[in-house]
Amino acid sequence: MSGPDGRGTRRVAVTGLGPVSNIGTGVREFGSGLRAGLVGYSKIRSFDPTGFPHAYAGEVPDFDPGPTLRRLEAGRWGRSGQFAAVAARLAVEDAGIAIDRRDARRVAVVMGTTSGESRLVDQLAAQAVAAGGYAGFDTNELTKLPAARLANAASEELGAAGLSVTLATACSASNYAIGYGFDLVAVGAADVVIAGGADSVCRWAHAGFYRLGALSEDRCSPFDRDRTGILTAEGGVALTLEAMDRAHARGARVYAEVFGYGLNCDARHMVTPNADSIAECMRLAHANAGVKPQEIDYICAHGTGTAINDQAEAQAVRQVFGANPPPMSSIKSMLGHTMGAASGFGAVAAVLAIAEGFLPPTANWSIPDPRFDWLDPVPNQSRPATVRVAQNNGFAFGGNNCITVFGALP
Amino acid sequence: MSADLVVTGRGVVCAAGIGTAAMTAALADGARPAPDVTALYSDAMPQPTGYALVDFDVRALLGRKGTTFLDRATGLALVAFGEALAEAGLVIDDESRTRVGIALGTTVGSLRSSADYSLETLVADRPYLVNPALFPNTVMNCASGQAAIRYGLRGVNSTVATGRVGFLGALGYAANVLRRGYASAMLVGAVEEFTPHTAWTHHRLRRPGQPGEAAAVFVLEPRANAVRAGRRVLAELAAIEEGYHPGDDPAERGALLAGCLSGVLAEAGAEPGQVQFAATTEAWNADDELIGRAAVAALPSARPVRVRDALGDCGAAAGALQFAALLDAGGRGTGVLAGWSPEGAFGAAVLRGRDRAEVA
């Protein structure tokens, strides 16, 4: 594949997966969770939800970074940074890569996020309330606050000395990270990029989504006629992206190839998605990946479970794919909305669909929406399928759309 | 750098005012007393002064439509985006709007927006009685999303949260986008607001100088596009590189940064002795001092470019202000911008002044 500027570029392999989620940590657990249609949300434990009409979220229960981390001192980093570091370590272990000082400069990290160390923001707010002013801000939380530290935590943990960048493009941020990582490997700026994202469940996002009318009471049922919205969720996820030649040379297992990605911006509204713009993003992604719509066997949806997102997403699919679109499921039905990590989990699901030959289901689905009753959401049960090419959607506040495309090796 | 990238416009908003001239005048004075900020907020402040643009009035500048709920960082950024587009004479129409993108650097977006949102859940009668209209301000890509709406920019739109190297991170991202052909021009910059939250952060973390605020945005595009459109080239981005230093030995970090600088200079085809201006991260502590000295030790003729004494500590936007200052100072020569974060992220860029750039 060559870049749009016509120069030859390198092919990019996915050789490692590192999910840290509420339906399982590590690729085996996460993969079997997807196959089983496991649901990972429950009553909120990380903050006191008293007074909120809704009290469910997709927390990662008993998250303990200690056993996985080798270099990072977890206590010096926030929860989202810890998610990112653990995900990165798992992705590198899964890829079977050892990073030594000699090639550390060739290993970069790109992490996406919506709200960074959002739980620290909650803590700072509580400190301000307790002290009666912002003078109450504690240096511990302030030091750990910068969103840059999500990528930095992963770089530090891996001893990676290539660039370390956090992209804060909200709920499509992991796809941005994967796209940037794809470019860095393709043009030869890095040999390995650990790309993904992280976010933490927090009080203020729970409140905000509730007030937007976008928060479901206790379940997320994307593409169902009676869907009621999202559940906020958390986790960390990373993919090891590696130059194909390097992966082959070391005899690595290659899950899939990154074919390409597309990104654009609605530029119309901060929170309301736009079907035309999403359709355009799909076309950009297909062109960049060098695939035609009819070649795509599976779409891992953005699928938040809000009335408006699922409608716009389905409409865009219809515009681009015509009368016979491929199956499109939403893993947010199982995980909830993991924000900046969401499209990273989607990427892992798309890659596993290709590598292991199954379609992850949309859980909690019962009644077709008459406005898109043609849609096959892979209801409730995963199923075997041959997936040669998969498309992974990510949309966001700010109108930041980013879609990645993965394919099987020839 | 294979795609020959040039700067054709800039928009600067800082404590000294709106526009590059205000910044230039402030920097010419060297140090400048920080303005009185006591009228800006009703909250208690750590000190009565700070490098805020005290009379910034987003409604007066951008009109009432769409500005009611904007946070300060977004307001500052929107003005800077507009100035940069205007200076470049870059017209956004149906042909160009999908081909002009954004890469904006930040630390955490607007801390005031997110922290006060959380605070509302604690003090309101019911925890959910927060204002839904303010919720979009809490996401870190608010400023870039709003800029896209205001100026009709439907291309690549990215927020690069690399903190103190926020501008270098955004610059690297934008260079990649242009190199890959995903956009024909990028608006690249960084923003940081002055609020009680940032003032107290600065105070509690015992940072030197006084906190400031700024937004600076530049039009970056392939030279061929600039020439075709007849846009004036202000400078050439001759090279940029980023990295990370795991561990925390400042001597090692300084050596790494010096190595990074010699690497980008080699890529730019410039001798270290030709570098006339060097803008490096302005130190927060003794480690930073050491790293900064080591970084430029091999640049004998480089004059330091500093902005903090005149414009305050502007966090992610500090690098963007330095970049604007380099554009100003480096009309006939070569300048470097080098930055690093406390965690260990670093980067360096080479800027070639317009006279050299035009004949190159």
Image (cartoon, coloured by chain):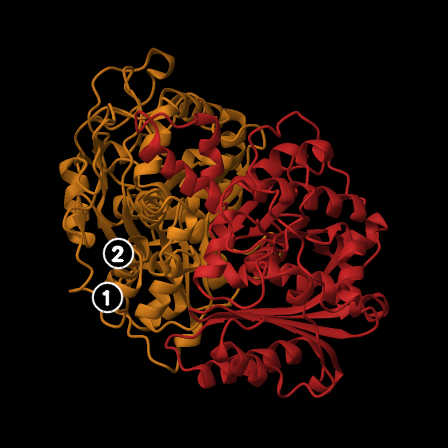
Residue at (67% x, 48% y) in the render: B53
User: In which quadrant of the rendered view does residue A247 lie?
Assistant: bottom left
**Residue occupied by mark 2:** A18
- Identify whether B69 is placed above or below A2: above
The spot of residue B216 in percent (x, y) is 67, 53
Q: Are marks 1 and 2 in contact (CB under 8 Å)?
A: yes
Q: Name the secondary structure under disc 2.
A: strand
**Residue occupied by mark 1:** A93
Q: Is residue A59 left or right of residue B106?
A: left
- Identify whether B135 is placed above or below A355: above
Residue at (47% x, 34% y) in the render: B136
The spot of residue A365 in percent (x, y) is 22, 22
Residue at (28% x, 58% y) in the render: A82
Q: Amino acid at mark 2?
A: Gly
- Identify whether B47 is placed above or below A212: below
Chain hosting mark 1: A
Residue B126 seen in render: yes
Q: Nearer the viewer, residue A282 or A296?
A: A282
- In the figure, what tint was chain A given? orange
- In the figure, what tint was chain B given? red
Q: Amino acid at mark 1?
A: Glu
Residue A296 seen in render: no
